[in-house]
Image: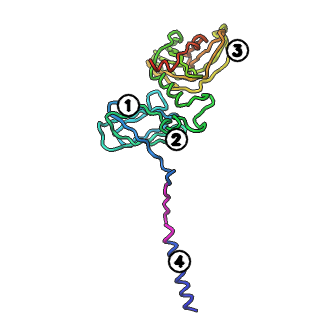
Amino acid sequence: MKVFIAFLVAVLASASGFAQEKRPANPVRILTAGQHITPYKIEVTFSKTVHILFPTEVRYVDLGSNNIIAGKADGVENVVRVKAAVKEFPGETNFSVITGDGSFFSFNVVYKEEPSTLNINMDQWINPDEGGKKGGSSIRVTELGEEDPTVIASVMYTIHRLDRRDVKHIGCRQFGMQALLKGIYVHKDLLFFHVSLANNSHVPFDVDFVRFKIVDKKIAKRTAQQETYIEPVRTLNALTRIEGKSTGRIVYAFPKIIIPDDKLLEVEIYEKAGGRHQRFYIENSDLVDARIMNELIKE
């Protein structure tokens, strides 16, 4: 009996030791293939800038080394500029981008004297088989109709970058400020307004809000009655402050607007805690004379 008990104890001790060997003290989780984020490879050079267009606004950019320079393009929320900071830097470096919708993008960067592309649309990289359009309706917004938001963003960025003044008769100048409507453009069922606000004084102008409303032409300047407010579906470079002796520009996107000839579209720019408000009016004839974006790009 004693021999049997001793044998049983030895077997249990051996089994316990074997179980301990199979159960690591600090388990290590292994990433599956689906959990890895595959980086995109891009080429940069010292003398040219690569522009990357993202589906939504960029919130964060992190560089892997000082061999490259990367950051948001001036006045544009969803475009990142990248270029080499060191000529012919060796090997490979990287950078990461986080956008407003929570998406994470990783890039591996190599130096090439003549990069294969200088303008990258991330939607086309993400979904090359769908012509740059994501599946389903994940990037569709009802207010934009059937348009891809990245196309709209590209149109607005082009208007801002070209900085043309195709409209020369609409604006307002008072209190040391000048508001101008520089252009009206159309792309399919959307209208785009290019507005500039210049501060000719030394006192900063803090923007409280910008308001668009349809008013009767006969009483537009005398009363606030019979007003219909409209809201832009997209805004590029929304201004909050215009420093002294400086100018800011905004691009607004609206659904197609047609107003009767006896009405006006009133644009108001209000100063926060101040009285230097700006106001100008757009007639229906100005709207129907909007320039077609495709023709503008070809010029």
Q: Does dot 2 land on a helix, a strand or a loop?
A: loop
What residue is rendered at 56% in x and 23% in y? 253
- Residue bearing mark 3: 226
- Residue bearing mark 1: 49
Q: How many marks?
A: 4
Q: What amino acid is at disc 4?
A: Ala
Mark 3 Cα-neighbour bin, 10 Å: few <14, some 14–19, many ≥20: few
> Of the numbered discs in the image, which one, if any, rests on residue 103?
2
The picture places residue 34, in percent across and down from the top left corner, at 51, 50
The picture places residue 157, in percent across and down from the top left corner, at 48, 26
Q: Does dot 3 land on a helix, a strand or a loop?
A: loop
Instruction: Work out which quarter of the rendered image holds the C terminus and state it.
Output: top left
Q: Does dot 1 land on a helix, a strand or a loop?
A: loop
> Measured along the vertical axis of the image, is residue 194 above or below residue 97?
above
> Of the numbered discs in the image, which one, if any, rests on residue 15?
4
Mark 1 Cα-neighbour bin, 10 Å: few <14, some 14–19, many ≥20: some
Question: In the rendered structure, which disc, 3 or 2, sits on the residue that comes first in sequence?
Answer: 2
Question: In the rendered structure, which disc, 2 or 4, sits on the residue that comes first in sequence?
Answer: 4
Membership of 28 in magenta stretch: yes
In this view, which residue lies farthest toward the right? 226
Mark 3 and 2 residues: CB-CB less than 8 Å, in contact? no
Question: In the rendered structure, which disc, 2 or 1, sits on the residue that comes first in sequence?
Answer: 1
